[in-house]
Image (spheres, rainbow, N blue to C red):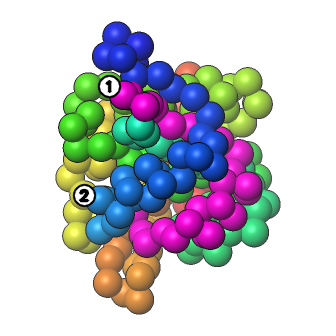
Amino acid sequence: MCEDRGVIMRPAMPGDFADILRLNEEWECFTSPLAHERLAELHEQALYHRVCEADARVVAFLLAFGPGVDYDSPNYRFFDTGSHDFIYIDRIVIDRAYQRVGLGDALYGDLLDFGRSQGVARLVCEVDADPLNTASERFHAQQGFVEVGSQWVAGGSKRVSLKERAIVDEVCVPLHS
């Protein structure tokens, strides 16, 4: 899917940080601010950090963590306190010019394959619910994610829907009830 459009998927490297920060800033209203030093820390802690590259620049990235890392995100902490068998998707960002061409599906498919190879049971994430990120909500529903909770974050300025899906092809039984 990616290769058909001249896009390659590969592990993220420190040389990609400028492009990753550019993409993150473009979508900061749905992600969160990210400085170079913080990205370097997150990259070192990440269980999975991949980019899609086209024309010698990063056009998409996905950053995810396993359980037990020292990450202060309240959304990560929600999942880390309830389970130790997950991959937390911290952020996926796709350049506007490359949206709706399958990069999100390709990154999630690769992450699912990675999770299966590691024997991990679930993918987990959050989606902005108030204000609603309609595109992300639709995408995650199509990917089979279900809500298992919600919480207010960013000083009470937004509510997130906390979601999960089984990695294996089985019924997703929520970890948080």
Which disc number belongs to residue 102? Answer: 1
Mark 2 or mark 1, earlier in chain: 1
**SS at badge 1:** loop
Q: Could you tell whether 41 is left or right of 109 in the image? A: right
Q: Residue at x 51, y 37 (%)?
A: 51
Q: Nearer the viewer, residue 88 or 49?
A: 49
Q: Amino acid at mark 2?
A: Asn
Categorize mark 1 by other alpha carbons within 10 Å: few (<14), some (14-19), many (20+): few
Q: Could you tell whether 100 is left or right of 69 in the image? A: left
Return the residue found at the far top: 4
Q: Quadrant of residue 71?
A: bottom right
**SS at badge 2:** loop
Q: Residue at x 62, y 34 (%)?
A: 11
Magenta includes 39? yes
Categorize mark 2 by other alpha carbons within 10 Å: few (<14), some (14-19), many (20+): some
User: Decide: marks 2, 1 in contact (CB < 8 A)?
Assistant: no
**What's the CA distance linking mark 2 and mark 1?**
18 Å
Q: The C terminus lies in which quarter of the figure?
A: bottom right
Q: Nearer the viewer, residue 42 or 136?
A: 42
Q: What are the residue bounds of the magenta stretch?
A: 30-56
Q: Could you tell whether 40 is left or right of 163 in the image? A: right
Q: Residue 132: percent from the left, percent from the top?
A: 23, 63
Q: Which residue is mark 2?
A: 133
Magenta includes 23? no
Select label 2 or label 1 by which is in front: 1
Q: The N terminus lies in which quarter of the figure?
A: top left
Q: Residue 152: percent from the left, percent from the top?
A: 40, 79
Q: Residue at x 59, y 62 (%)?
A: 39
